[in-house]
Image (tube, rainbow, N blue to C red):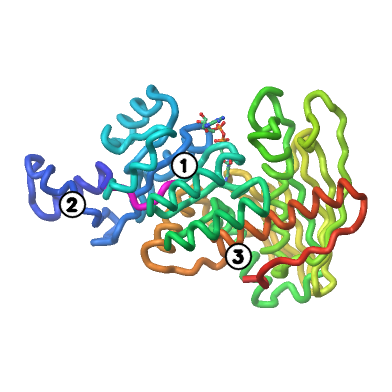
């Protein structure tokens, strides 16, 4: 219960501040918007870096999720974040002792927001502790690892959800709705352009051991994932070409720029660009027999902007991470089914396609893609 909701709850029951300790074990929530007695998903954030800062701020506006735990290797961060977000010392952990969350009834789920290559082992440890896992994209750095994560979470009977925030973004969902309702006609073409010029050459994103690759793992994954939910099918083949202007900055195994093409069972094709060396690339375009849809920016933190052949998209902006965490709380606590899946199997499909793109770059040959499940 955050401070605001706690205050509202106290007002509601006419209690005084002296009764606060009696309320501590409650995980029910009543907010000023009248969502009374809603269960709250109690989340521990793991990896208190840039993106976690954004998530933490956005979660202050969540109705169904709240921060109750912190995991970091830096004691000062645990102290500072602990006081900012009202997380008691007993709910703060480091990377050596976080398995102990097993015995902490204040934590339902852990949101893993660390470098990509750490997601695999951290997910498995969280699952073994019996807590639900929310894991940032890419869920892992190989198909093999992704499969192990899905299996570990199944075995532990916990949810595994991947941080695909665009799956809850209103303009994206409107295009998805139009396409699913056949308002754009048969889809023929998708274009996804995702990239930015990356700075500091010493960051983990340019270290193969921590990132698992380069731009494709980090930003190109939005085009891969977007192609799938925009077209509404799973790709069956890929061709790809890699371009590298600096072998010093973008070392072996760290891709700078990749162009890739996807083919879908209906005959639709996608043409995509992933890059760490060009700016102002954040655009989706979908072409159907009877209409088009365009998003630009398509995957930034927003506001997302777009139009379709029917006119501009006018859905209001809300912080993506607020929408995502509220929706994920509903998935975990109430078994809600999102319009576009965000589970481990969804993340795993992207890993299959990423691997196929890398293989196509290496071999120069078209790669067939056989995904484990049909489109959800
Ligand atoms: P970051 O470098 O800002 O933060 C990473 C955090 O992990 C830091 O606090 C760092 O101290 C910690 N960490 C733990 N072990 C580490 C190790 N061995 N080496 C380096 N750091 C270690 O990175 P970020 O931008 O917050 O990205 C974290 C994850 O979030 C990545 O998987 C990234 O793809 C994902 N991300 C997702 C979005 C999105 O929109 N969904 C946006 C940004 C980042």
Residue 178 in the image: above or below residue 93:
below
Q: Are marks 1 and 2 in contact (CB under 8 Å)?
A: no
Q: How many marks?
A: 3
Residue 173 in the image: above or below residue 299:
below
Q: Secondary structure at mark 3?
A: helix
Circle 1: is it few (<14), some (14-19), or many (20+) Cα within 10 Å?
Answer: many
Q: Which label is found at residue 303?
A: none
> Which x, y percent locates residue 248?
81, 23
Is 109 in the magenta? yes
Which residue bears the numbered disc 3?
174
Q: Secondary structure at mark 2?
A: helix
Gap in angstroms between the C-alphas marked 1 and 3 = 24 Å
- Quarter of the image for residue 369 reads bottom right
Which of pointers 1 and 2 indicates the residue nearer the eye? Answer: 1
- What residue is rendered at 63% in x and 59% in y? 313
- What residue is rendered at 77% in x and 39% in y? 275
Q: Which label is found at residue 9?
A: 2
245 on left or right of 199: right
Q: Which residues are magenta?
A: 106-110
Gap in angstroms between the C-alphas marked 2 and 3 = 35 Å
> Which x, y percent locates residue 239?
87, 55
Closer to us: 189 or 304 = 189
Sequence-wise, which precedes: disc 1 or disc 2?
A: 2
Circle 2: is it few (<14), some (14-19), or many (20+) Cα within 10 Å?
Answer: many
- What residue is rendered at 62% in x and 44% in y? 300
Q: Secondary structure at mark 1?
A: helix
Q: Is residue 63 visible?
A: no
> Which x, y percent locates residue 312?
66, 59
């Amino acid at each position: 219960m955050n401070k605001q909701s706690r205050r509202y709850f106290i007002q509601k029951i006419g209690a005084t501040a002296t009764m606060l300790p009696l309320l501590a074990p409650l995980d029910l929530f009543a907010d000023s918007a009248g969502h009374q007695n809603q269960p709250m998903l109690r989340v521990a954030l793991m990896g208190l870096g840039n993106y976690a800062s954004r998530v933490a701020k956005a979660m202050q506006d969540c109705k169904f999720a709240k921060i109750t735990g912190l995991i970091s290797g830096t004691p000062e961060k645990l102290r500072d974040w602990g006081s900012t977000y009202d997380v008691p010392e007993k709910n703060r952990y480091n990377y050596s002792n976080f398995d102990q969350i097993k015995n902490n009834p204040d934590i339902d789920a852990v949101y893993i927001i660390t470098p990509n290559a750490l997601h695999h082992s951290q997910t498995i440890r969280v699952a073994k502790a019996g807590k639900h896992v929310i894991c940032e994209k890419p869920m892992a750095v190989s198909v093999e690892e992704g499969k192990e994560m899905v299996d570990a979470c199944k075995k532990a009977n916990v949810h595994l959800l991947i941080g695909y925030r665009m799956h809850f973004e209103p303009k994206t969902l409107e295009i998805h709705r139009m396409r699913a309702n056949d308002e754009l006609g048969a889809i023929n073409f998708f274009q996804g352009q995702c990239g930015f010029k990356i700075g500091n050459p010493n960051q983990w994103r340019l270290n193969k051991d921590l990132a698992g690759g380069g731009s494709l793992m980090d930003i190109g994954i939005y085009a891969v994932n977007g192609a799938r939910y925009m077209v509404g099918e799973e790709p069956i083949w890929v061709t790809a070409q890699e371009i590298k202007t600096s072998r010093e900055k973008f070392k072996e195994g760290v891709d700078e720029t990749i162009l890739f093409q996807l083919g879908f069972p209906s005959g639709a094709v996608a043409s995509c660009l992933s890059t760490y060396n060009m700016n102002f690339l954040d655009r989706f375009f979908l072409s159907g027999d009877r209409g088009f849809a365009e998003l630009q920016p398509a995957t930034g933190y927003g506001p997302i902007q777009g139009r379709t052949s029917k006119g501009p998209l006018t859905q209001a902006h809300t912080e993506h991470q607020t929408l995502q965490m509220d929706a994920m709380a509903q998935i975990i606590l109430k078994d809600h089914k999102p319009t576009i899946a965000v589970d481990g199997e969804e993340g795993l499909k992207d890993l299959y396609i990423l691997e196929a793109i890398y293989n196509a770059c290496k071999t120069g040959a078209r790669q067939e893609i056989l995904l484990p499940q049909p489109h959800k």
